[in-house]
Amino acid sequence: MSRWRPETTGGPAWSRLPAARPTAVQRPDTYDLWIRAAGLLVIGAIVFNFVLAFLNTRVMGVSQNIVMLAELVLIAGAMILAADRRAGLYALLAVYLAYVALILAVRPELDLKAIRDGLIPIAFYFLGRRVRDIESVDRVVLLSAGIVVAIGFFEYFLLDLFVANVNVLKYYISRGTLEVGDNLIEDSSLFISGTRMQGRNLLPFLGTHRVSSVFLEPVAMGNYGAFLVLWAAFRKDMAYRGLLFAAACIVIVLGDARFGMMVCFAMIAVMVVYRVVPRLIWLLIPAFITLAMAVYGMSTDALRWEDDLAGRWLHASWLLLKLDTQGVFGISSYGGFLEDNGYAYSLHQLGLIGIAGLWALYIFAPVRSPDAWRFRAPLVTYICLLMVVSASFYSIKTAGLLWFCAGAVDVWRGFAAGRQRGEDPSASR
């Protein structure tokens, strides 16, 4: 019988067990860096036209190609920051690009704006869906409001110095949007709607000048002010909410945005009743408005339109009726001006199938909290009303922030999550 003898080398038996496998190295959390990059990208989408206008006035000429390249860089940056391992973004992009390639192949003339118009909401919406905390979005909105108000005051109080460095009319002529002689007031360097010829509607003692700030044209200024009201009304527990309301009022008044002010009242009313409205109604609202415009345009015997709410509705109806069947499906060669009617412009650029598909995707997109519909319902109202009188909704300088916030709200846990963490809303106020 053999005796157990300790090993003379290598130590006791238990010391010779296989070494444990090294644990996987934990990747550092780069969210703070990511949210800063996303915020700067959204701010860049708001101010890049202002920067280009400054360069065009003081440094070098800016052509339409440079403007398109700047927008392409911003959209590509949003796509890169929005990319993750989930297939939703890539699948939607593949379907959208295939569809647009089809209608552009059938259309007699190539218009790359049709591609851009749909990429902006897709890129910035999915960028927003990667946000982890809604407070980061609050800070982006507040920062943008501070910039817009500061530049707006600079334009209003130091107009000569402003146009000496940012000649708005010259910039829009250089990029091909306007032509020499389009200005309504001789020697004016502002956008053609930068002066209210018949007098200001909001606080007339401020004069006829309509401030446009970094947006360079008052319509976008008013749209942005209405969106600030929406965000401030929705984010009832955000820090500095009162300041955001004040900034929104300043933006709307400086821009003399009478329609934007009416949109604000409509959005606030919708936030009261949105719970009783079925989702199908929100889906069909654009169809109802389009049908109403078409019927009104065919039935009226008016010969001219005035620059008021009824007149703009009449003008929009006439623009819509300029589309034939091919125009409704986005394959028309019509090259006339449609930007004063967002519905006609949308049908002409992306066609009925494309617009209806993108709209349905947003209306039925899943949300993480029921509180998200407190934002989505007035946002739908905002979009549908603004498109009656303008296609500026597609402009990246306002659409980037809008869709970034929309995506962030859809993945947000809701107000209950903040209360569960023990946050005190009164402290943030």
Image (tube, rainbow, N blue to C red):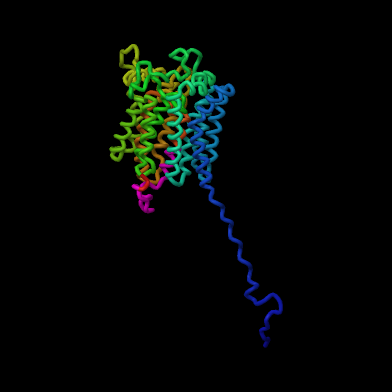
For this orientation, the residue located farthest to the bottom is 1
Image side of residue 2 versus residue 346, left or right: right
Q: Which residues are magenta?
A: 404-426
| 105 shown above or below 238 | above
- x, y percent for residue 317: 36, 19
The quarter holding residue 352 reads top left
For this orientation, the residue located farthest to the right is 9
**Residue 223 among magenta residues:** no
Q: Camera-side residue: 269 or 46?
A: 46
The quarter holding residue 219 reads top left
| 270 shown above or below 157 | below
| 17 shown above or below 330 | below
Looking at the image, which residue is at 39% across and 25% down? 255
Image side of residue 294 versus residue 39, left or right: left
- Looking at the figure, which quarter contains the N terminus? bottom right
- x, y percent for residue 284: 35, 32
- x, y percent for residue 182: 47, 14
- Looking at the figure, which quarter contains the C terminus? top left
Residue 239 can be seen in this image: yes
